[in-house]
Amino acid sequence: MKPTSSTTHNTRSFPLVEFHYHAPMLNGTTAPCVKTSKSLRDISRDYFDAEANREFTTEAAVFGTLIVMAIVPIMGGISAVVQLLCVLPLF
């Protein structure tokens, strides 16, 4: 047997909307006091003074490792091209 719907055709399909709703406003007096930086340069300087010096050695080691890992296949490719040119007759 087919189930019947419990809704009627005369009911609203959308929920009621309260049109007079206003979002709460944040007043300047209720917000906590926060020290603001004057510019992006000041923010960057603060970050690099506090954080970057601690991680510089680790990042330099990782960067050096990546450079070596990138140079090895490039040198292998150059060596293969040179060997190929030595084997092929040019004229």
Image (tube, helix red, strand yellow):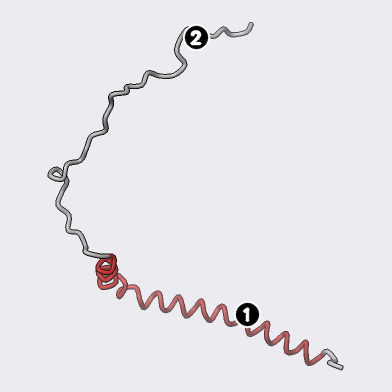
| Crowd around label 1: few <14 · some 14–19 · many ≥20 (10 Å) | few
User: Nearer the viewer's eye, disc 2 or disc 1?
Assistant: 2
User: Residue shown at 25%/73% (left/top)?
Assistant: 49
Residue 35 x %, y %:
17, 58
Q: Quadrant of the C terminus?
A: bottom right
Q: Is 9 placed left or right of 53 in the picture?
A: right
Question: Image quadrant of residue 41?
Answer: bottom left
Residue 60 x %, y %:
41, 78
User: Residue shown at 53%/81% (left/top)?
Assistant: 68
**In what element is the residue under mark 1?**
helix
Q: Quadrant of the N terminus?
A: top right
Look at the picture and state if 77 lies above or below 20: below
**In what element is the residue under mark 2?**
loop
Q: Is residue 65 or residue 86 the one in the foreground? A: 86
- Which residue is the site of mark 2? 7
Question: Image quadrant of residue 77?
Answer: bottom right
Question: Image quadrant of residue 62?
Answer: bottom left
